[in-house]
Image (cartoon, rainbow, N blue to C red):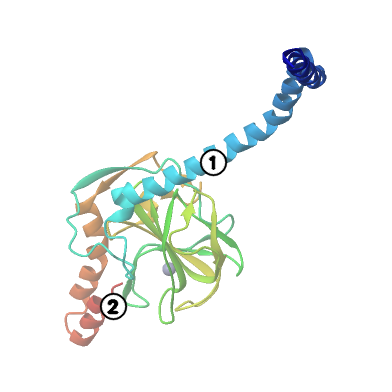
Amino acid sequence: MQFLKKITIAAATLLALTAFNTNAQLRLPDLHDQEHKDLIAAQRPIAADIKLVNTMKFIEQLKQEEIADNEIYSEYWESNLVNPYVGVEIPDTKNIDVSGYVHPIDIGTVTSRFGYRPRFRRMHYGIDIGVPKGTPVVSSFDGVVRLCKFERGGYGYYVVVRHDNGLETIYAHLSKITVKPNDRVKAGDQLALSGNTGRSTGPHLHFETRYLGMKINPETIIDFEQKSPINGIFAFDKKACEQSIKKAPAKITKRKTTASSRKKKTTTKKK
Ligand SMILES: [Zn+2]
């Protein structure tokens, strides 16, 4: 009986070992190793893809966080106004990096400058570039689109972009806007197509540069003939800006001392 039991166990063990051996033969160490090599080889490009996608996601996330953290895009951001910086104290001077400037429009020439327009008895706070309707309009600096709006009696379709360097630029009388608020744009990225909407007498781009809501003559920053910044660093000067805005209407007020109604018109029609 004991012998029979031993035989059975031995037989069972042998059977199990045989089965194990058969199995083991299918996965010889070197073959197995080769399989691994194949798998690793096959996985490499996939892993690289995943890595790239993750890196891009990470960069995008960083960008979003940077936008949210950056006080440029968190302070006085939520506003429907062209000038959201109501009550903000403007520093006397500020060096602004404008080296990354890209001209907002490829073609066209300056048709009207910043300053007082005697013909219309009002200030012109931007520069006009005459271009056919439908010409692509691009962002002048890296930034985030703040406003895309329509104003029948003024700007027409217009876009306001806030930039990393602290400036805001305005693009007006557009025919079509191709971005939306909160879009991240690089200098040279298309914002819109030029047009003739709003208070406009012919197809052109009205372009404005502002710092904390203060209107700056774009020609003090940019050489419009060269289509490039005058200097890499623009030295903002609050007093000079205030004077450039006030100078012309003051002259007119002097001239029109007898026409009090006209005087009112010149001082109230500011944008
Ligand atoms: Zn204009």
Q: Can residue 166 be seen from the camera position used here?
A: no
Label tally: 2
Residue under the image location 22 percent in, 59 percent down: 242
C-beta proximity under 8 Å, tags 1 and 2: no
Say which residue label 2 marks: 269
Q: Which residue is mark 1?
A: 56
Q: Using residue 68 as the reference point, say whether residue 179 is left or right of it.
A: right
Task: Report whether 180 appears left or right of 267.
Answer: right
**207 lies left or right of 56:** left
In x, y percent, where is residue 128? 46, 64
Q: Quadrant of residue 10?
A: top right
User: Measuring 44% from the left and 72% from the top, which residue is drawn there?
Assistant: 149
Disc 2 crowd, CA 10 A, few/some/many (<14, 14-19, 20+)? few
Identify the image quadrant of residue 132. Answer: bottom right
Q: Position of residue 176 (x, y in %)?
A: 56, 70
Describe the element under mark 2 as helix, strand or loop. Answer: loop
**Label 1 beta carbon within 8 A of ligand 1:** no
Pick the quarter of the image with the C terminus.
bottom left
As helix, strand or loop, the secondary structure at mark 1 comes to helix
Which circle, 1 or 2, is nearer the viewer?
Answer: 1
Q: Which kind of residue does numbered mark 2 sit on?
A: Lys
- When the figure is inspected, residue 218 is found, relative to residue 201, above or below; the finding is above
Point out residue 219 in the picture as x, y percentages from the top left corner: 39, 53
Note whether 192 is above or below 122 in the view shown. above
**x, y percentage for residue 68?**
35, 51
Q: Is residue 22 visible?
A: yes
Mark 1 → mark 2, Cα distance in angstroms = 48 Å
Ligand 1 falls in quadrant: bottom left
Q: What amino acid does circle 1 point to?
A: Met
For the N terminus, give its image quadrant. Answer: top right
Q: Residue at x 35, y 46 (%)?
A: 165
